[in-house]
Image (cartoon, rainbow, N blue to C red):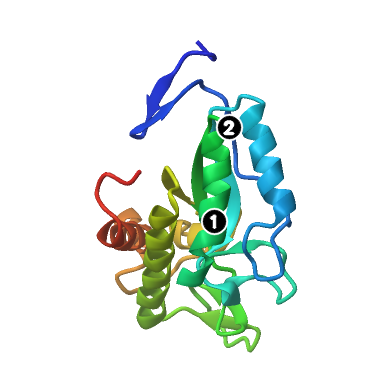
Amino acid sequence: PLFQSIDFCGIRLKNRFVRSATMENLAAADRTPSKELVAMYEDLAKGGVGLIITSAVRADRGWDPHMNSKGLCFDDKGMIPAFREMVKRVHGAGSKIVIQLGSFFRYKDKVAVPFAEALDESRHFLTVEDIHHIAERFGEAGAYSRESGFDGLQINAAHGFPLSQFLSPCYNRRSDEYGGSTQNRSRILTEITAEIKRRTSEDFP
């Protein structure tokens, strides 16, 4: 069965082999896919993997842990041609490709946190206004991704980054609509997803 085709979230895959998101740190200086990264993904596709999930792509370069990051970023419409070329090369080699939008790490030049018990100058407590802005940035990146030809989109809400902290009652002790119940703690993710769907379409996986 590993070699049989399958419909996965509306994407027709030629087999069941998936290259999961893995950080390569191979972005070009402008944070678009470098020649080395495109060649790597093309080699994976030529090797027969049915689906490639990119490494984390920030919807805003200001969200990176540090300014010298070599991770991908997709926060400007002018970056679409570079990402579209990568998608074209992967498709040409017979595979599908999904973009992973990575969680924010920093916000307003400080470490972003869903909840802060004490004032800490190194951390930024995310307000409701901040959360709405974050969802908008994810939505814009989603629209750029759809226009670039990606087959789908994955949101990284793991690894202890702020999105996963929102989900955890250990980290998230907010008293507003983004804290408390499971529904409230996951609200930021449902709003991000809704904003991406609004800017793309309901049939974009």
Residue situated in front as seen by the camera: 178 or 151: 151
Q: Quadrant of residue 160?
A: bottom right
Q: Residue 1: x and y, percent?
A: 50, 10
Q: Residue at position x 51%, y 22% from top? A: 16
Q: Quadrant of residue 197?
A: bottom left
Label 2, residues with CA under 10 Å away: few <14, some 14-19, many ≥20: some
Q: Residue at position x 36%, y 82% from top? A: 129
Q: Is residue 161 left or right of residue 182?
A: right
Judging by the rendered image, the residue that carries numbered circle 2 is 93
Q: Residue furthest top?
A: 1
Q: Which mark is residue 83?
A: 1
Mark 2 secondary-structure assignment:
loop
Residue situated in front as seen by the camera: 51 or 82: 82
Spatial separation of the CA atoms under disc 1 and disc 2 = 16 Å
Amino acid bearing label 2: Ala
Residue 191 in sight:
yes
Mark 1 secondary-structure assignment:
helix
* Image: 130 above or below 101: below
